[in-house]
Image (cartoon, rainbow, N blue to C red):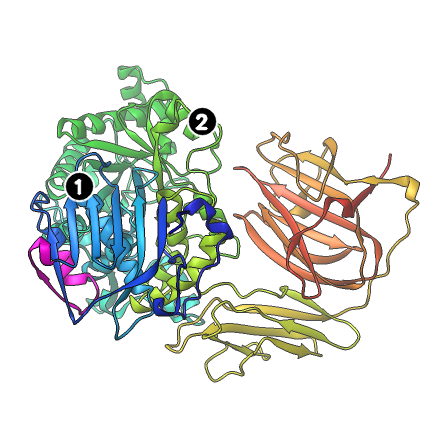
Amino acid sequence: MNKIFSTLLVSCALYLPTLSFAQQKNILPQLIPFPQQLEAGPGLFQLNGQELGYAIDPAFSSTSLPAWINQSLFGQLNKKSVKKTNATLQLIKVQGLSNEAYELKIDQKGIQIIASSEKGAFYGLQTVQQLYLLSGTTGKFALPYVTVKDQPAFKWRGVELDVARHFFPKDYIYKFIDLLATYKFNKFHLHLTDDQGWRIEIKKYPKLTEQGAWRTYNNQDSACFVKAKENPDFNLPKELIRTTNGKEEYGGFYTQQDIKDIVAYAASRQIEIIPEIDMPGHMMVATKAYPELLLDSQSAGWGKQFSVPISPWKESSYTFVENVLGEIIDLFPSHYIHIGADEVEKDSWSKSAAAQAFMKEKQIANLHDLQSYFVKRVNSFIRSKNKQSIGWDEILDGSSDTSMMVMYWRGWVKNAPIEAVNRGHRVVMTPTNPLYFDYLPNSSSLDAVYNMNVVPTDISSQKAPLIQGAQANIWTEMIPSTARLEFMILPRLSALSERVWTNKPLYDSYRNRVIAHFGLWNKMGLRYRMPDLTGFAETQVIVDGQSVLKVVNELPQNQIHFTTDGSLPTQQSPVLNGSLVVKKEGPIRFATISSSGAKSELYQVDFKNDTWKKSVKPNENSVAPGLMATLFNGTFANTSAITGPEVRQEVISNIALSDTVKMPSFGAKIRGYIYVKEKGIYNFYFTCDDGGVLRIHDQLVVNNDGQHAPIMKSGQIALEPGYHPIAVDFLEAGGGFTLKLQYSLNDSKVIDIPKESFFHKKD
């Protein structure tokens, strides 16, 4: 038996999801996250009969392990506790392994899990459960022979869910926790309060839920209603709508008993629930219910940019906060309490005479330090309860208490992580790009999540241990339903799980393995974003009387349905099998639809009549390799606004701007020629953050303009061999940039354009 380490997976063939283990020999299982070390053997463990006997080392004192085995392991298979000598499944406690590590062995004798803690034993069980769910077996129990040695790369493997903007009931939270457990996450951050809703019962302040848990429809709800016309996933669940005094209201909240139940359920799955009560901003619900929290002569509502915050100079504010947090601390055994401290409307404080007098009295120099005063005082209270507080990275804007943990989210504040660790803070990485899972996923999303650096490259090895791990954030302004939630996070959640657990460069392997997990999610009754349909461009050209729409579908069991009249495709629409000849201008809309009726993203390709573009013939002595980039300093809304004095020019290869561009925001005009050897239909794939446009022969090929996160857009053009003028306009609005251009010829694979293909005019 040869050892196969996960680092070699990129070169290993993996079995297709439709195959059962019984059809395979010596093939690596499609586990996510993949273990640190795995040895696959030539054989299958098959259970005789319909009963599994298990033995748990009495040194594991908790009842959660047998409870989970009895309730969840191997579905409906009968399980019972037996003596070790008769056990098919053994959980053995040893010394010497780290807290979350485990070892797993499956051979002809059965299943053995070794760990030093219940956490490790549970993660071993999750690996076994995945092997079972991925096995493809139905009536016959069979697991592959494997030997696994495994432990996580990071301590913090988290997911945040905003239940304030849109609410998710307790029963669904259980299902969500099970999903997190499947992928070995250990932190579940609940964003319980915000301007749009207060979702937890506080007995001392009943009006928080009486008034704040229910609302008449707001602008976010209205936006969802509009989108629901084309996608029912945007409908608000009927069970969360009630009628009061003739008006429909939306909402819900967790009772304190609900919270206790949720906490216990999560704990049985080795997940710590971290509550967040956002303060001193994002508290409009609280300030409406209890106006004594408000600023002098102010009223609850919106300030210049965010909601009017509570007053950090009023003792009544601290009485309120401490009373609320006191009940929160009693409900949540978590070591961590999150207090938000993000997006505070400091402009309201600047206009307050009481605030100015307080700052003078306390010798507080500026508004950032006024917020720091509030945060530090709340932190002192939390520490007095033997808890640790967490804040978003705005707590770094003023002086900070290094006992607090920092969650880094503002991707455009590039120095925040290094500033935090240099001050001595522990940090959890949650940057907007790529870990805001409410941002619309696209063809680049999985790559961005999987290949992110959890520890930023500019942090020294000495400071690196302060980076605790990473967390996905799910803000729910435009996520009103469980179906939409699952669609937004899957499969991205699986990519993050492997990044924070395995933390190895196994992306090619992961892309193969994740296909099998679509079937697993079907078994779990989860919605998901189907794999991207590829092989086409968003605009295609009709030349010589026709164009061919070719679509690659990674899940062929889900058929592609299309329309040509602008309507939404349904299961009754024609099926697109691989390719379609198109002879008329206009849009074709298509989507994959599962047998259950679940739809993929809606795709649209616009077809336009065009002609073959003839090459130009520049003087060979007048051109040089590379493209010429002209840079402009400033913040531009779109590429047409790029004007002003030129900062500098530089020659670049492909369209990759050099790392020497240090301006926080700028515009670039990139000019030159692209040389193609063959006549053909070229698909160009243009990824950028922020906006950009691609023109060839002054013809708009790809429009990816505006300020946005990394998005890939595509377009098509018919080129004859030779030189063709190319122009790329690009803007960076802050936060770091992404700029990438690829192409494919006819039906070839998408590749990076060789740098030898680009030229520019010599001075």
Q: Nearer the viewer, residue 478 or 349?
A: 478
Residue 136 coordinates in the image, percent (x, y): 34, 69
- Of the numbered discs 2 and 1, the one sitting upstream in the chain is 1
Name the side, left or right, on which 210 lies relative to 471: left
* Relative to 557, residue 321 above or below: above
Q: Which residue is mark 2?
A: 459
* Relative to 474, residue 321 above or below: above
- Image quarter hosting the C terminus: top right
Quadrant of the image occupied by residue 131: bottom left
Residue 454 coordinates in the image, percent (x, y): 42, 38
Residue 465 bears which disc, if any? Answer: none
**Residue at (22%, 44%) from the top-left corner?**
120
| Range shown magenta | 67-86
Q: Which residue is mark 1?
A: 117
Q: Is residue 222 visible?
A: no
CA neighbours of label 2 inside 10 A, class few (<14), some (14 to 19), many (20+):
some
